[in-house]
Amino acid sequence: MNWWLILITFLGVNLDFFFILLILLKKYDVKKVVLGYVLGIIVLVSLSFFAGKLLALFLPEWLLGVLGILPIYMAFKDDDDDLADDKGRSPVLATFITYLAVCSGCNLSIFLPILTGLSFEDFALVLLFLVVLSGIVVVLINLIGNIKVVYNTMEKYGEILTKIVYIGVGLYVFWDSGLISHIMAWL
């Protein structure tokens, strides 16, 4: 299991949501934002893992490398990340629903190829790592979110950095699954 890949994937998938977290943290208590965010992470990462396990029952690992096309597709897909309407909802539910609305496609398509080959034990460790990382990220964003240069940098470069990470993850999935070596053997 490549912990650096998990970390970089988490950051890349959530980079655009970090900007939204800045807004949510101005409206709601940090603990409630953390809880909503963590619940969203657990739901989407678990869905990715179990979808990957289902596919792995029918396809060899090297062929699952084709799923690397999903992160690359997401890098080139034009997507508006508008905040979900949260009137009348609890802060936890508002954060959770906003996260699902904004990040479902990215999380499912990016994490699915990465988590497919993991055992249940490794997946549990990854999920625990992501839950802890999510809490740390929210606290850090809350601390540094009011610094103007941080806010401006995320707004200016966040989208392009996200796209670069998605392409890198897709290429890594092609290589790590054995798809590239399989194709090279055919040639």
Image: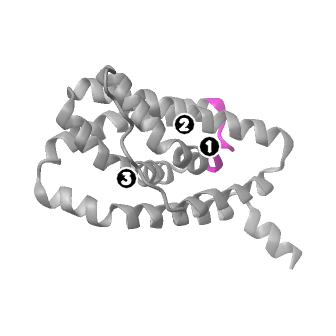
Q: Residue 152 vs residue 9: left or right?
A: left
In the image: residue 28, left or right of residue 82: left
**Residue linked to disc 1:** 115
Q: Is residue 19 magenta?
A: no
Q: Secondary structure at mark 2?
A: helix
Dot 2 or dot 3: first in sequence order is: 3
State whether residue 88 is above or below residue 172.
above
Give the residue drawn at x 53%, y 49%: 106
User: Residue 23 in the image: x percent, y percent?
Assistant: 23, 42
Q: Nearer the viewer, mark 1 or mark 2?
A: 2
Task: Identify the residue at the far left of this view.
Answer: 147
Q: Amino acid at mark 2?
A: Val
- Quarter placement of the C terminus: bottom right
Does label 1 or label 2 sit earlier along the sequence? 2
- Where is mark 2, residue-wise? 45
Write the start and end of the magenta stretch as one range: 112-120
Q: Earlier in the sequence, mark 1 or mark 3?
A: 3
Comparing labels 2 and 3, the label whose residue is closer to the camera: 3
What is the residue that sits farthest to the right in this orientation? 186
Q: Secondary structure at mark 1?
A: helix
- Looking at the image, residue 18 lies above or below residue 28: below
Cα distance between the residues tagged 2 and 3: 17 Å
Instruction: In the rendered structure, find residue 16 and report the number of the disc placed on it.
Output: 3
Q: In this orientation, which residue lies closer to the viewer: 102 or 117? A: 102
Q: In the rendered structure, which amino acid carries the disc numbered 3? A: Asp
